Amino acid sequence: MHKFTADHIFCINRPVITDQVVITDDFGEILAIEPEAHHDPITVRKFKGAIIPGMINTHCHLELSHMYGKVGTGTGLIPFITSVVTQRNVDPEIISDCIAKADNDMYQAGIVAVGDISNTLDTIITKSISSLKYHSFIEMFDFLQEENANSEFEKYESVFSKFSENLKPSDKVSRVPHAPYSVSKNLFSKINKKNSGLNNITISIHNQETPPEMELFEKGSGSFYAFYEKFGIDLSRFIHDGKSSIHYALENLDKELRTLFVHNTLTTKEDIQAAKEKIKNAFWCSCPNANLYIENRLPNYKNFLESDAKVTLGTDSLTSNWQLSIWEEMKTISKYQSYVPFETLLTWATLNGAEALGFEGDLGSIEVGKKPGLVLIDFQNGQVNWNSSIHRII
Ligand SMILES: [Zn+2]
């Protein structure tokens, strides 16, 4: 049995508490939360700072960890994707080492679960022995080519099968579409058929990340045409419907499945409303550092706060970020859009993320019966502030 306390304890499911002790077993399961006065001080580990539950990273591409520093900042999404496609294949041993290191870095950064996009089998071994929980998203795309849907689906279905066979009991895996601009109706429908009726999985989709994505769907023009042409892909049969790209996704997603929209840098209140009307359980993942890295822009968080939307946080990959730390993502939001309250950011970083991945039974809040991981935000100059750092307690 272990007893922990600090100046503040953010349980997340209730207002901040003080003068309380969190009691856990050796594995971190919360046994009780009791007044500090009831316990002999010698039996309690007391920290200067705030205790929070372990954080949830709802969007990562662990398999791109080896491309740290390889792609320039501020180029926009299309040049970014081009760099990734042309540089991602290197020595498998380097790829594996970078994946294992990134997994450990996330653990040290107070992260307990990850929603991770996988196009390949590269992350299977690390995930099977990791202390972190993973919801792997086996991501499919056919560049809007209806006739290629079948072969692309089969290609990624074999990745899905291997993941299913090697999953540790705490983990999950699902088949997901990449983005509105890269998945044909045919491929959406193949993915939906396989996912239909599955309980407690999440579907993730990259959404409204770059102006050319919006232009493609709203006007039927823009730089996606030239980008696809460069790779020998013909977009001339693509019919735009004049609405923002999320509408194409909403028409083709399974409304019954929990859905995580990722990036949303150009998402409006109308888009959020449209998703609420269509999808039963929608979450909105923001990756602010990656948005600054790739596009040098951020979402307008007011749209999400005023719509009462469930926001989560993600890091994206080390190809488009300087580190994999949810605390650093919180800092960035606070720096540029300081109206988002600290406790709201904490909820995005913990409980909302756990719910988005279906891990809320165990993770996301400090409650009796859960095993959320405990993380200390230390005091700097006598308080928690953005110079504070993160320490793993259990
Ligand atoms: Zn991504």
Image (cartoon, rainbow, N blue to C red):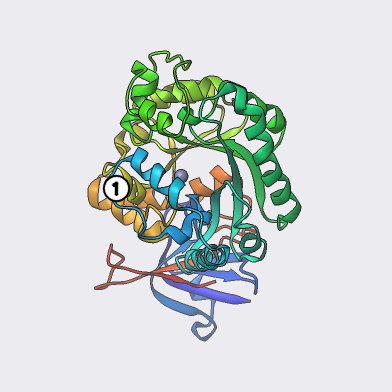
Specify whether 86 is left or right of 129.
left
What residue lies at 37% left-to-right and 17% top-to-bottom?
Answer: 220
Query: Quick check: 269 above or below 123?
Result: above
For the question of whether residue 200 can be seen, the reply is: no
Using the image as rendered, state which of residue 241 and residue 376 is in the foreground. 241
Q: Quadrant of the N terminus?
A: bottom right
Using the image as rendered, state which of residue 380 and residue 211 is in the foreground. 211
Residue 8 lies in what quarter of the image? bottom left
Q: Residue under circle 1?
A: 292
Q: How many marks?
A: 1
Q: Residue furthest bottom?
A: 42
What residue lies at 31% left-to-right and 41% top-to-bottom?
Answer: 76
Place of residue 158 in the rendered image (x, y in percent of width and height, measured from the top left): 71, 43
Place of residue 160 in the rendered image (x, y in percent of width and height, measured from the top left): 68, 44
Label 1 crowd (10 A; few <14 / some 14-19 / many >=20): some
Place of residue 9 in the rendered image (x, y in percent of width and height, measured from the top left): 44, 63
What residue lies at 36% left-to-right and 49% top-to-bottom?
Answer: 290
Query: In the structure shown, which secondary structural element does the residue marked by tag 1 occupy?
Result: helix
- Residue type, label 1: Leu
Specify whether 245 is left or right of 340.
right
